[in-house]
Image (cartoon, rainbow, N blue to C red):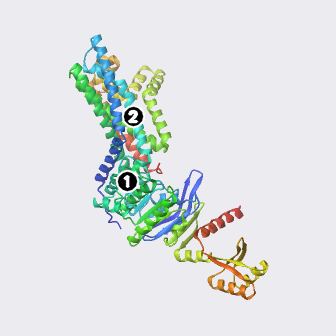
């Protein structure tokens, strides 16, 4: 269990994280989402004992990761944003070095290199300076997976990758997590929101160093579903369309280049269509636009910005 | 949850030492340093021997004295830079290694030992080769002083690696760390003695003499310089001042032992300080 209590981190005048209180359980996939500078990386670094809190405290299974790294960090594997592999060592040598630091049996190096696919790709003997960005990130992931720690902390692991490699990385991560039976918790800071759908158990939205949203999967699915929209192309008077759709239960109707966007819960949608038809407004086309996590994210962030502006 | 496998602390220290050393060897730092250092030492020794033969001044000790200036300028600079390097390069002192379940003092100590060993490899190679050249040209007489000089230089290298690590921890930036390292080096090799002389000039003779004597202990480069010269024939080289220093420290042998002891402290204290400093700071 990672427990954060009233956690604040300041870098001179800049407040990176402010007053965060959270509990993170092992075995769950938790995403930290927020704009640049929202405090995601700082939060992960605090959990990994790389920086010291200005106020508040972090406890990893009861231990302070900054003061007692040898106890706290047994439960954590941290994957930094940029791979930091020594150029002149081979993939095998680097992974094996970290394996020895963790006191794991020698065969673990091969196992983990097989897990990330580097063994089969015959990349293990390559020098780290010869690796592509994607393979370097996989090597770093291999190091992070070595210990089978209770928490895998991933700090924007795809930030340095092209879209294809980023997608591959997430697919691989999901596969590895599924293969392990979800025994280990993952805490991931990322901007690739679409990759999180169906993978995360919880999303924590950060903005300005504060938690602005903390949703579990059920709540997340509900809120995303609520954002589903119906795009309808209708022949007829615009005002009439809006009035009829509203009467039929639409929460929001707005004109769009191709017709109208109607926001309504699934039951009301059918009613809106049949009511339009009944009033002689011919529906030429109909399309359900699924809700997207990205929209929810933008909505939350916009709310925070608006609140901040109104507060000023 | 507490039963997670961990290597014994001693094994982990050994692994980090190996890691540092391997990195220094692989990126050709050790080889480059060893070759350049050996070439310079042999060059200076060769010219020293030629001049001493022409002037009729022979002996291992005289040639060793001619190497002294080169060593006390070059070794601290290289040590300082490698100390900064070891804590500011992300591939060897980045988030990945500092997020391992290791105590920071152990990690820094192991890195310090690895850096010292890397420097020692290069220096032992260069000193051995140069010693062989001197022995071939002039015979092996007085080789003890040369060996002591080489040993003291190794301690000075360790002291400067430790100081470099302190510079890295204090500045927390690569370029600023190197800049501070060079400044500290310049102060120790050039400005320190001037400052002491200047300060001594406003004191009474007795106070100034005491200042000059104790100031040696505050500068590892002075310690090497004075201890080496004493070992290489202090009575001839130092004259009255050397005799007074030896007298104050209990004779020539005791003085050399005391100065060497102080140098051992210098080799350990900065490295230890950098560990303690980094324990209280965010990762560089």
- In this rendering, the answer to whether A84 lies above or below B62 is below
Q: In which quadrant of the rendered view does residue B62 lie? A: top left
Chain letter, disc 2 residue: B
Secondary structure at badge 2 equals helix
- In this rendering, the answer to whether A207 lies above or below B138 is below
Q: In which quadrant of the rendered view does residue B1 lie? A: bottom left
Q: In this view, does B103 lie to the left or right of A239?
A: left
Which disc number belongs to residue B78? 2
Residue that appears at 42% across and 45% down: B87
Q: Nearer the viewer, mark 2 or mark 1?
A: 2
Secondary structure at badge 1 equals loop
- In this rendering, the answer to whether A13 lies above or below A239 is above
Q: Tell which circle, 2 or 1, labels the residue nearer the N-terminal end.
A: 2
Q: Mark 1 points at which residue?
A: B103
Q: Where does the image place residue B159, in percent across and percent down from the top left?
A: 37, 36
Which disc number belongs to residue B113? none
Q: Where does the image place residue A104, in percent across and percent down from the top left?
A: 30, 60
Q: Which of A197 and A63 is in front in this view?
A: A197
Q: Which of B50 and A248 is in front in this view?
A: A248
Q: Where does the image place residue B107, in percent across and percent down from the top left?
A: 37, 50
Query: Local crowd at mark 1 within 10 Å, few (<14), some, or many (≥20)?
Result: some
Q: Which of B185 and A260 is in front in this view?
A: A260
């Amino acid at each position: 269990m990672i427990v954060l209590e009233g956690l604040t981190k300041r870098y001179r005048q800049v407040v990176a994280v402010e007053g965060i209180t959270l509990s993170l359980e092992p075995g769950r996939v938790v995403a930290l989402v927020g704009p640049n500078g929202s405090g995601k990386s700082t939060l992960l670094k605090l959990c990994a004992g790389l920086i010291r809190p200005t106020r508040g405290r972090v406890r990893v299974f009861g231990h302070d990761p900054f003061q007692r790294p040898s106890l706290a960090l047994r439960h954590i594997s941290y994957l930094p944003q940029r791979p930091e592999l020594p150029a002149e060592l081979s993939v095998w040598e680097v992974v094996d070095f970290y394996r020895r630091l963790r006191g794991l049996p020698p065969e673990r190096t091969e196992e983990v290199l097989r897990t990330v696919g580097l063994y089969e790709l015959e990349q293990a003997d390559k020098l780290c300076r010869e690796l592509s960005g994607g393979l370097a990130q996989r090597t770093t992931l291999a190091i992070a997976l070595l210990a089978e720690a209770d928490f895998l902390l991933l700090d924007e692991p795809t930030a340095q990758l092209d879209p294809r490699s980023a997608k591959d990385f997430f697919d691989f991560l999901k596969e590895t997590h599924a293969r392990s039976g979800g025994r280990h918790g993952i805490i991931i800071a990322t901007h690739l929101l679409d990759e999180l759908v169906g993978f995360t158990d919880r999303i924590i939205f950060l903005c300005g160093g504060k938690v602005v949203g903390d949703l579990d999967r059920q709540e997340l699915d509900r809120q995303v579903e609520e954002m589903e929209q119906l795009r309808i192309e209708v022949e007829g008077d615009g005002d009439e369309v809006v009035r009829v759709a509203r009467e039929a239960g639409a929460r929001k109707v707005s004109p769009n280049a191709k017709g109208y966007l109607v926001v309504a819960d699934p039951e009301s949608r059918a009613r809106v269509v049949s009511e339009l038809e009944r009033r002689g407004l011919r529906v030429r086309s109909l399309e359900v636009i699924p809700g997207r996590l990205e929209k929810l994210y933008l909505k939350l962030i916009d709310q925070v910005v608006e609140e901040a502006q109104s507060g000023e | 949850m507490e039963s997670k496998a961990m290597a014994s602390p001693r094994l982990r220290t050994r692994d980090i030492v190996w890691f540092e050393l391997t990195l220094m060897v692989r990126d050709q730092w050790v080889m480059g340093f060893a070759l350049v250092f050996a070439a310079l030492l042999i060059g200076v020794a060769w010219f020293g021997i030629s001049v001493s033969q022409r002037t009729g001044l022979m002996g291992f000790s005289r040639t060793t004295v001619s190497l002294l200036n080169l060593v006390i300028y070059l070794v601290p600079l290289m040590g300082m830079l490698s100390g900064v390097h070891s804590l500011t390069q992300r591939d060897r002192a980045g988030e990945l290694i500092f997020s391992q379940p290791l105590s920071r003092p152990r990690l820094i100590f192991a890195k310090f030992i690895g850096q010292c060993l890397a420097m020692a490899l290069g220096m032992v190679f260069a000193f051995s080769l140069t010693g062989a050249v001197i022995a071939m040209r002039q015979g092996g007489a007085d080789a003890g002083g040369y060996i002591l000089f080489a040993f003291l230089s190794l301690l000075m290298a360790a002291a400067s690696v430790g100081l470099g690590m302190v510079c890295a921890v204090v500045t927390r930036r690569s370029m600023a760390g190197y800049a501070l390292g060079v400044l500290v080096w310049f102060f120790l090799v050039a400005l320190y003695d001037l400052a002491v002389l200047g300060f001594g000039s406003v004191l009474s003779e007795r106070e100034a003499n005491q200042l000059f004597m104790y100031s040696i202990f505050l500068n590892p480069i002075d310690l090497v310089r004075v201890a080496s010269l004493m070992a290489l024939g202090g009575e001839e080289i130092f004259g009255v001042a050397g005799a007074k220093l030896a007298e104050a420290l209990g004779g020539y042998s005791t003085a050399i032992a005391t100065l060497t002891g102080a140098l051992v402290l210098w080799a350990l204290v900065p490295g230890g300080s950098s560990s303690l400093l980094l324990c209280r700071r965010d990762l560089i």
